[in-house]
Image (spheres, rainbow, N blue to C red):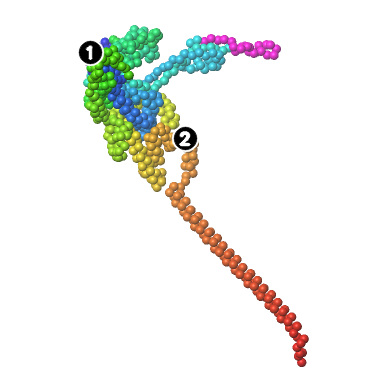
Amino acid sequence: MAKMDDTEFQQVVRGEIQQAIGYHDTELQKDRIDAMNYYLGEPLGNEIEGRSSVVATETSDVIEMIMPSLMRVFTATDDFVRFKPRGPEDVAAAEQASDYVNFILNNDNDGFVILHNWFKDALLLKMGVIKHYYDESEKIIEDSYEGLTEAELTALAGDDDVEILEQDIRIEGDPIVDPMGNEIAPAPEVYDVKIRKTTRDGRVRIENIPPEEFLFNQHAKSLDDCRFVAHRTSMSISDLVELGYDREEMEEHAGHNELDLNNERQARFEEIESAAGGVSPLDETQREVLVTEVYIRSDYDGDGKAELRRVVCIGDGHEIVENEPFYMMPFSVLSPILMPHRLVGRSFADLLKDLQQIKTALTRQLLDNVYQTNNARVAAVEGQVNLDDLINSRPGGIVRVRAPNMVQPIVPPSVADSAIPLLAYMDEVREQRTGLSKASMGLDPDALQSSTATAVAATVSAAQAKLEMVARVFAETGVRRLMKCILQIVQKHQQKERIVRLRNTFVPVDPQMWENEFDVEIEVGLGTGQIDQRIATLMTIASKQEQILLELGPHNPLVTVAQYRRTLAKTIELTGFKDANAFFLDPDNLPPEVQQQMQQQAENPKEDPLVEAERIKAEGEIAIDKMKAEQDIALKREKMQAELALKREEMQMKMQMRQQELQMEAQLRGIEAQMGANISPNLPRAQ
């Protein structure tokens, strides 16, 4: 086959665009306009003048009930998507790729807003679309500097990104003179310059695409098998010129275009603006041009194989200004309720439209009945009643009659007894379709106050089943593709190393070093109840890990310190704290001072903790035995000292008693001697 010429290829592209627009306008646009009107509570078109025109808000109520739980699923942690290595050599690269891709979504882009709008588009409008691409933008800033020295001017001119537009030299100050008045140096010259600085930056950009701007071929089953996908939007002449397109060519196609009159776009802004179409700006560079960015599979080169090409068309005539081969469809699409073999599924608005119509009709009938009861019709005898008094219905008013009972109220029958149970039945139907109820959201104390914990858990779990299904569909279809595409984009376009903050540490990231592909794993958790269950499970795991580490030491075949820390970090994240590093250090990214301490400990290794514990225990037992022995010796010493003191006291008492006995004996002898001397003169002397 011969290569297509530009005219033939433009006909192919133009034909695909027209077919996709026709399919979009006939099959999808009306449903999305209706869904938007139902969400905004717009009149249904069957209102009757003088009757109630209230509109039920089932669509808005259900979607707003779903969004908080759905966002909690995907934003409870910053790393709900992880890349898994396919081999042991890919572990470190997979971890860094996971952190970096999540960083791109949440830091380089406004991840929360992107996910919120993406999910809400899907719940309301059947399909949410985001576009992801690598933006190598250039920003041009013009600035002026005054009073620069020659050295400062040289340094400024040496910057390759700076272009000097204007330059003036002037004298500032007086010349330098010596004490004699002779000029030593002339007055200094300074420079006033006007510059233009161009800054270049490359980042992955993620944007929400309004559904009416997204085109695809009819009967498309998924993005992977689409032969044609396009993004049709409006861009200003200034933005297009900044991207490198010819200004004169852009000005030829500028002005109002068919997208300005799009019914779906007008329905989106109907409540805040009344004018159809746009207003031409006074600045010509801000005039808008219709730009259709097409991704088409076509055998452009004539080799018999259809390759993916990126084609940029401008204007309502779809003139091609860019045509190049491409490597991926830069879109991710999701629907909350999948329809087999269709790219577009069903929305929650589709489930609720008829219920909103029925509840609107019932509510209007009920209110009309109340109005008629409060302002009942009356039967009046003609000519016997002052009709002006009767028509003037005001509290305390007087109606003049010529005779009694000339005025009889016509009381309408009450419809409340039948309408209110029917409204409650419609709520039950809504709960069956969507899985959402007051009980499941924890808002109905009457339904839960007398139930057991098991019954409450069953009610909440059953109600969350559909929400869990929606979250799983979003995760496995749109979010998985989004993260894989971000990884693919940075691997292709980021050619130099970039230093970013990952896990509270600044690390260099070079995607070119990730040579292999990774598997994608998405962690989806639902609701407060399941979070509590997961926290309890993690705490049980942590206790087992602690036991293993204490009994078998850090070098055991079951658990590492890093795994134990990961368990603690995941527990902290589930409680709502984003930064686990504020509580526990990451063994893989330790601060320099901690690394230094660990290195010192490694240079002076200690014995095994178990051996050290046994040694400490033995030393403790020896110390206790020694203490007991010393206490026994001290006790015996005190006992001996007490016995010696007792014996000493006994001996002293005996000596004192002996001394007293001797003294008494001496006194007795003295008395006896004295008595003998007194008796002896009266006795005869011995012969």
**Circle on res. 617:** none
Label 1 CA crowd tier, 10 Å (few <14, some 14–19, many 20+) = few
Mark 2–mark 1 distance (CA, rounded to whole Å): 98 Å
Residue 412 in view: yes
Indicate the amino acid at tag 2. Pro
x and y, in percent, of residue 65 in the image: 32, 27
Residue sitting nearer the eye, 470 or 547: 470
Residue 190 falls left or right of residue 221: right
Going 52% across and 10% down the picture, which residue do you hit? 167
Going 22% across and 25% down the picture, which residue do you hit? 341
Tag in front: 2 or 1:
1
x and y, in percent, of residue 400 in the image: 28, 15
Going 56% across and 12% down the picture, which residue do you hit? 190
* Circle 2: element type: loop
Q: Can residue 342 be found in the magenta stretch?
A: no
x and y, in percent, of residue 429 in the image: 24, 28
Going 40% across and 32% down the picture, which residue do you hit? 578
Compared with 683, 349 (above or below) is above
Indicate the amino acid at tag 1. Glu
Q: Earlier in the sequence, mark 2 or mark 1?
A: 1
- State if disc 1 and disc 2 touch (CB < 8 Å): no
Residue on which the image places disc 2 = 591
Q: Can residue 179 be found in the magenta stretch?
A: yes
Residue on which the image places disc 1 = 382
* Circle 1: element type: loop
Residue sitting nearer the eye, 315 or 170: 315
Quadrant location of the N terminus in the rendered image? top left
Quadrant housing residue 589: top left
Q: State which region is magenta.
A: 167-188
